[in-house]
Amino acid sequence: MSLLEMKNVYKTYGDLNALDDVSINIEAGEWVAIMGPSGSGKSTAMNIIGCMDKPTSGQVLLDGQDISKLSRRELTEIRRDKIGLIFQQFHLISYLTAVENVMVAQYYHSLPDEAEAMEALERVGLADRAKHLPSQLSGGEQQRVCVARALINHPEIILADEPTGNLDEKNERIVLDLFRQLHAEGTTLVVVTHDAEVGATAQRVITLEYGKVTSEDGDISFGKGSSAIK
Amino acid sequence: MTGKTSKQAMYLRMITASVARRKSRMLIALLAVVVGATILSGLVTIYYDIPRQMGMEFRNYGANMILVPADSTQGGMTRESIDEAASHIRSDELVGVSPYHYENLTINATPMVAAGTDLEAVRATSPYWYVEGAWPSKPGEVLVGLQEAETFSLKVGDKVTITYTVTGDDGRDAIEENPVEFTVSGLLDTGGSEEKYFFISQEDMESLTGKELTYNVAELSIQANAERLQEIADDISSSVPTVSPQVVKRLTTSESTVLTKLQALVLLVTIVVLALTMICVATTMTAVVTERRKEIGLRKALGASDRSIMMEFMGEGLLQGAIGGLFGAGLGFAFAQLVSTNVFNSSITFRPILVPITVLAALLVTGLACTIPVRNATNVDPALVLKGE
Ligand SMILES: Nc1ncnc2c1ncn2[C@@H]1O[C@H](COP(=O)(O)OP(=O)(O)OP(=O)(O)O)[C@@H](O)[C@H]1O
Ligand SMILES: [Mg+2]
């Protein structure tokens, strides 16, 4: 059984099909990139997988549980328990320090544990910045705090929508390295990206166009995947 | 670094960090609460102090019948006739009888009026008298009305020579003078006409004037309703021909309406100010929620329930309410003191009970003000607000 299964999913805004009969399978431990032109429905798909939105029709099975018909409240619980989110705009709480931002995720999930939050920051190489406010951190550092926050509760799946979109090459590499480590540890990763290089690091690239899956490359870890982009 | 933190500890850490580190925004709401709480505690203090300031609340329990001579050309009433009149009142009704003998006297040739009275009884019939210093307790002591104390520049502990002048039959020629030295034991502050007199014991008055006292007036404090009072008055006037009883309304209607109106005004101002505070806090909180939509969306994305979002914003609001209320309670007392010294020329006492009351009121106002903005916070759709732009 796949960790995530989307079956004939539609998401309709007025007469626009942001997702148009999308069926995707993602296995546990897989690292998948979702690519495609702007407006092709990547974020829409991510929001549905991340339990922030519901499909207009179709089935979404997470861990075998159909999440397409759940209430807002039930979705919140699943998001809290199973999903780690990373955004292009980082979205850290401005008045909390780095370590406190990580602890917020623990707070909603179970119990805040400062020592554990510190370990997570250490892992992303920010132990010495733990007491800094987001405004005192560089963009790359902020995104690393977000990675620490996403992994702190050991989610079944980490979803990242353009995680390197606002980063320079050096910081992009640091974040990709972190993903590589997480992947090696068995974490399931789904990363939306425009960047061919980021896409190439994934095991598999799913390409969306006008809300439809147009290609689903297999193992492209040898760099073949980049040809499927254009 | 410590291990697990409790959820409550993290909750407090988050809301205090928000209030402490997001100063400018919070300051406006906090300021509104402080101003509101200051006015509240200040005006409530004044509200309760107005009756005292006007010497009325306690006057309510004072004399409600006076006896005057039936025929004033015959001089004052004797002690016997006063006692006889008092005997017509049941002992469980009679609180006290204070006879007053007024006499024109002089201090350094300046005329003044002194009353010889039963000082013990006065304490029962005029419980609202406020004495700075002490009541006269031994012979040779005098209680001086505040106004006279100013005229003669007297203060507690001063010695003063009071002179009785024996006049001839025509009441004009001075035949003999009798000066006696008194010690000022206390100053009398009533806010009323009593402040224009000196008060000494009947015994001192007798030895000063050298004659047996007759009384110009006697004040009676009786525990009875208006009907029963009139009955007593009728009874006395028919059975004791030398005295004429008069029922006194304890508080004149005009005085009591002024008082009620003044208090109503203070109450109204307080309510208006609290309403304004609430509007200000609600507006600020609405702005805060709008400003922090992204943060709310993020918290929800991290798995925050509507309930925890509401608790967090409510917690921030109430924290400000508590801080503002505490400051307001202190500042309110200062404000009331300022008003009191400027308007009523007297200081007020600090009522500790007003501190928790003010804080509670501030919490109530901020809590109410926050309900709508906090509800709006839960309507934030994380998918929408977290979308990159
Ligand atoms: N809330 C919404 N209401 C109406 N239309 C929407 C809404 N959200 C998305 N859309 C539309 O759905 C389509 C897919 O949007 P989506 O955000 O998924 O694109 P995307 O692939 O993430 O694009 P980008 O690479 O620019 O982020 C777009 O045409 C967009 O205009
Ligand atoms: Mg997008």
Image: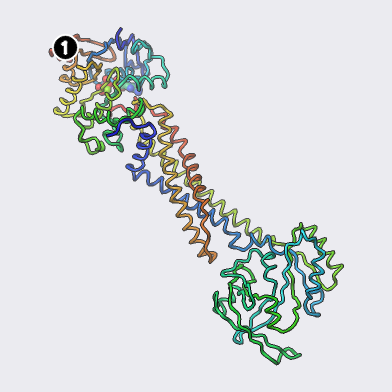
Measuring from the top left, give residue B287's x and y in whole percent.
39, 39
Which quarter of the image is occupied by the N terminus of chain B? Answer: top left
Quarter of the rendered image showing ligand 2: top left
Determine whether, in the image, residue A167 is placed left or right of residue B156: left
> Residue at coordinates 59% horizontally, 78% vertically from top-left?
B183
Front residue of this view, candidates A201 and B160: B160
> Residue at coordinates 57% horizontally, 55% vertically from top-left?
B47
Front residue of this view, candidates A1 and B128: B128
Measuring from the top left, give residue B69's x and y in whole percent.
79, 74
What residue is pinned by disc 1? A220
Q: Chain of mark 1?
A: A
- Furthest toward the top, the residue is A1
Occupied quadrant, residue B74: bottom right
> Residue at coordinates 67% horizontally, 79% vertically from top-left?
B204
Determine whether, in the image, residue B369 is placed left or right of residue A41: right
Name which residue type carries label 1: Ile
Measuring from the top left, give residue B115's x and y in whole percent.
68, 76
User: Which element carries disc 1, helix, strand or loop?
Assistant: loop
Residue A111 against residue B328 in the figure, above or below: above
Q: Is mark 1 within 8 Å of ligand 1?
A: no
Category of crowding for the residue at label 1, using alpha-carbon neighbours closer than 10 angstroms: few (below 14), some (14–19), many (at least 20): some
Front residue of this view, candidates B208 and B256: B208
Residue B197 visible to an observer of this rendering: no
Determine whether, in the image, residue A188 is placed left or right of residue A171: right
Which quarter of the image is occupied by the C terminus of chain B? Answer: top left
> Residue at coordinates 30% horizontally, 20% vertically from top-left?
A155
Q: How many numbered marks are there?
A: 1
Occupied quadrant, residue B190: bottom right
